[in-house]
Image (cartoon, rainbow, N blue to C red):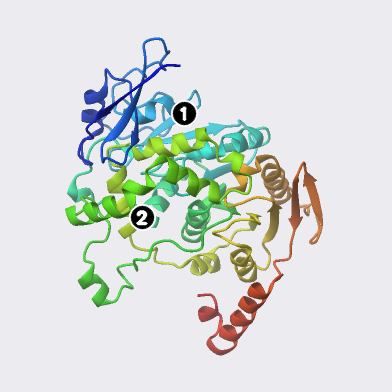
Amino acid sequence: MKILVDKCSVGKPFATARQHINRHAKRRCYEVPSSSGCHETIRPSSSVRCKPEIANVTVSQQQPPSIPGHRAPARIADCLKPYITADSRWWQWKYDSKIHYKQQGSSGPCILLVHGFGVGAYHFDELIQKLSATCQVWAVDLLGQGMSWPETEPPEDARLCFSIETWTHQLTDFVEQVIQQPVYLAGNSLGGLLSAHLAATQPNLCRGVIFLNATPFWSFMPHPETAPRLVTAVLPWNGTLPVPRLARFLVKNLWWSLLSRRRVLQSLVRNVYADKSAADDALVDQILASTQHPLALDAFVSILFAPQARLSFDGMLAAMQCPVCMIYGREDPWVVPLWGQRLKRLLADAVYLEVSPAGHCPHHEAPTAVHEAMSKWVQSMESGKPLPWAVGEQWKHQHLTVTHVDGGARNVFEKADVLWYAIRKRFFGNSRAQK
């Protein structure tokens, strides 16, 4: 196949989606970052078939209906168009944003899948298909991730901040307006933290939580209500758009230009997978596509400076009132088993299932094993019957082993953490021991 490569200038980060589309409407190009600061545009020759363009539709300025549409929004960045699929659906939300999601299954309990940082609903594609046989399944792109973006430049008075609070509000409205009934939440990494936050703050919307290697930490910036005065004086900006020029300049040159390179991104993704073949080119391409959105850099800067939630992760767990299941990849280099054991200590009644070998994204790396674990646990919650596996039992899925563990320490580092937890609990009480 003959490939022509040329270079094009990239619009300002705050160029609107419509401006971006008009500028590239006739080129049908796919942009990837280059070391020169421009974007290399790979454009098929005339002998190569291009994917059909998505027809424009009229965007209503009125409040969105309770049942969203299946058609793509009129103003969607060119970089995202190739990834619109037959099951893509759209829901209009605040900040003049179009939220992308997928839904399969017509009967059974409702499950909402929440992805981790940098990916989207597509990360659950195989799991959605498997779960939809017995459940109603939704997977939604968080705002500023995947294909969920504001259609126009957010005005300053909108005070959009890509934070835990904003994403939790998005999930709350999505459950209330789209699903319209309580759900089982299943979140990976950042999605696990958001699931805990939603379950803690909106218990009426949550029937249970499934943690998939949930990250227990997010953001280094304290919440405005708890931040010391010195911090607010030194860092007066809290991640709301528009992004200050200095912050954009520093982040772009120190991190963004590097992280949005294909080779670097592919290396980072493969590092968190036990099975490197699961982090294939298709996954990396789709992650890269979102980095080409006109608002991608500003969203990334906002995320870096956005404040923490009012509740810590341990505070969220303490406030949760629903049953919990943990399905963790044992070979995760980021959320190592020690973090799962800490969670299990705080939630003694939680079911802890460990998949090995699997890394940070077991739902994508081992979807068959995760599907069986999730579906059996949900069935157990719905029927009131116990799980078919007792603590200590394990079962096989081809080369994978799933073990129902008790969360006990297994090596010297984990044992030291247990000892440290006991010391803090003894001298400072539960509130300090959980921090």
State the residue at coordinates (59%, 65%): 339
Q: Position of residue 35 (x, y in %)?
A: 31, 41
- Is the residue 251 above or below the residue 96 in the image? below
Q: Quadrant of the N terminus?
A: top left
Q: Residue at x 66, y 57 (%)?
A: 330
Q: Would you say 363 lies left or right of 410 here?
A: left
Q: Is residue 73 left or right of residue 212?
A: left
**Residue 400 drawn above or below residue 420:** above
**Mark closer to the chain start, 2 or 1:** 1
- Quarter of the rendering containing residue 422: bottom right
**What x and y, as percent, mark residue 172?**
44, 49
Q: Closer to the camera, 275 or 316?
A: 275
- The disc placed on residue 163 is 2
The residue carrying pointer 2 sits among few (fewer than 14), some (14 to 19) or many (20 or more) residues within 10 Å by Cα, namely many
Res 307 → quadrant: bottom left
Kindly give the residue lying farthest to the bottom in the view shown: 427
Q: Position of residue 9 (x, y in %)?
A: 22, 32
The residue that label 1 is drawn on is: 88
